Amino acid sequence: MKARVTWAGDMMFVGEGGSGHAIVMDGAPEAGGRNMGLRPMEMLLVGMGGCTAFDVVLILKRGREPVTDCVVELDAERAETDPKVFTRIHVKYLVTGKALDPRKVERAVQLSAEKYCSASIMMGQMATITHEVVVQEA
């Protein structure tokens, strides 16, 4: 896997993945940025959320569960001093479908957290990660 980050002036950077897709990262104005993109640490959280959401939806679809939506909300705390790593991450899954089996949704989240989501497993080496699952009827 490859990626490239290019400085775009001030404290803005453009990150491009090997897939050819790009995203803007920028700093807060008090750090010299123009607030035109995600902060790099936000990108880590978003990446983790995307990774686990992908897993959960894929597992449910493969299990023929009628999932219609999946939203992952992440709430993280960081260390007070440098390096300001994540110390706690709470992940809330809002999974919607028609007559979803809550046990299968819980199992999909567990499989993602413990076996499939590389980002969550990596972040869990530094942070305590907790999960909450809400199953909603479509």
Image: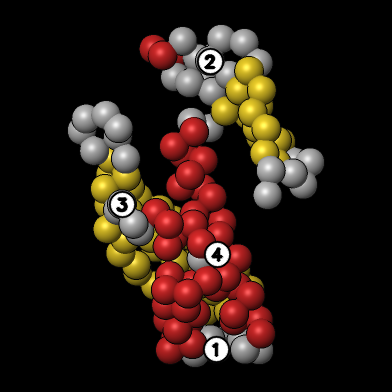
* Residue at left offset 66%, top offset 89%: 64
Front disc: 2 or 4? 2
Question: Residues under labels 1 and 3: Cα distance?
Answer: 37 Å
Q: Earlier in the sequence, mark 1 or mark 4?
A: 4
* Residue that mark 2 sits on: 11
Q: Is residue 107 visible?
A: yes
Mark 4: give few (<14), some (14-19) or many (20+) Cα within 10 Å: many
Q: Earlier in the sequence, mark 1 or mark 2?
A: 2
Q: Earlier in the sequence, mark 1 or mark 3?
A: 1
* Residue that mark 1 sits on: 99
The amino acid type found where label 4 is placed reads Ala
* Residue that mark 3 sits on: 126
The amino acid type found where label 2 is placed reads Met
* Residue at left offset 35%, top offset 69%: 132
Q: Earlier in the sequence, mark 3 or mark 4?
A: 4
Q: Is residue 32 left or right of residue 23?
A: left
Mark 3: give few (<14), some (14-19) or many (20+) Cα within 10 Å: few
- Secondary element at image label 4: helix
Question: Residues under labels 3 and 4: Cα distance?
Answer: 21 Å
* Residue that mark 4 sits on: 53
Are circles 1 and 3 on residues that touch, CB within 8 Å?
no
Q: Is residue 109 visible?
A: no
Residue 98 placement: quadrant: bottom right
* Residue at left offset 30%, top offset 64%: 130
